Structures are given as structure tokens and as C-alpha cells.
Image: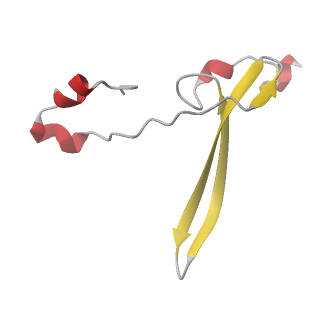
Amino acid sequence: MVIAPSRKDIDAIPSARLGDYILQERMNFTPVIETPHGMTKVELRIMYVWLDELRPVLVIVRMGRGQMMGVDQNKGMAWVDRRRR
């Protein structure tokens, strides 16, 4: 996994191997929730299915401070680990 690849990184992928990669647009999350350890970013994802119409079926909420959401930068903090309260 390459986080924040440069144009040079992308151009270095051999054309025959382009199908082996997934490139996702980087989202800039703004810290909006105050926690005992400072402001924290929030990501909200909604999964939809299309049957006869578009329907929301699942919501995922993740909080974090790091470069990637859902990675262990919050590990061991009292506000996310009830054993430390």
C-alpha cells in the first residue's frame, strides 16, 4: 500500500500491471469533534443498494487523527478503550 503516491510513483507502474492497482482519491478530513486528547476527524460512509430504488442499508462511522482513518493512532486512549477509564 502506498499512501499519497506521487505522480512519479504512478508513472512508474508498468502499463501491463496497471490492472493490479487501485488508485483512490485522497479525502481531506477536518477535525470537528473535541475529545479529551484534542480535536478528531470523522469519516461517515453510507452503503447503498439499488433494487427497485436506491436505499441506504449500512452506516459506518470512524474517528481518527492519523493520515489514514481507522488505523491504530487512537489505540490505548481512554476515550476509545473503556479499560483505561
* Above-or-below relation of 20 to 71: below
Q: Is residue 14 above or below residue 44?
A: above
Taking the spot 53% from the left edge, 82% from the top edge, the residue there is: 52
- Which of 20/5 is in front? 5
Q: How many labels does the image show?
A: 0
Residue 79 in the image: x percent, y percent?
81, 24
Residue 49 location, x and y as percent? Answer: 54, 68
Q: Where is residue 80 in the image (x, y as percent from the top left)?
A: 77, 26
Name the side, left or right, on which 38 lies relative to 1. Answer: right
Question: Percent position (x, y) of residue 60?
Answer: 65, 48
> What residue sits 27% from the left and 39% below the top?
21
- Image quadrant occupied by the C terminus: top right
Colour scheme of this structure image? secondary structure
Using the rendered view, name the quadrant where residue 8 is placed. top left
Q: In which quarter of the image is residue 12?
A: top left
Q: Which residue is drawn at 40% across and 25% down?
A: 3
Q: Is 47 on the left or on the right of 40, as rendered? A: left
Residue nearer the viewer, 44 or 19: 44
Q: Which of 31 and 85 is in front in this view?
A: 31
Residue furthest right in the image? 85
State the residue at coordinates (36%, 27%). 1
Figure check: 48 above or below 75: below
Q: Find the residue positioned furthest to the bottom.
A: 52
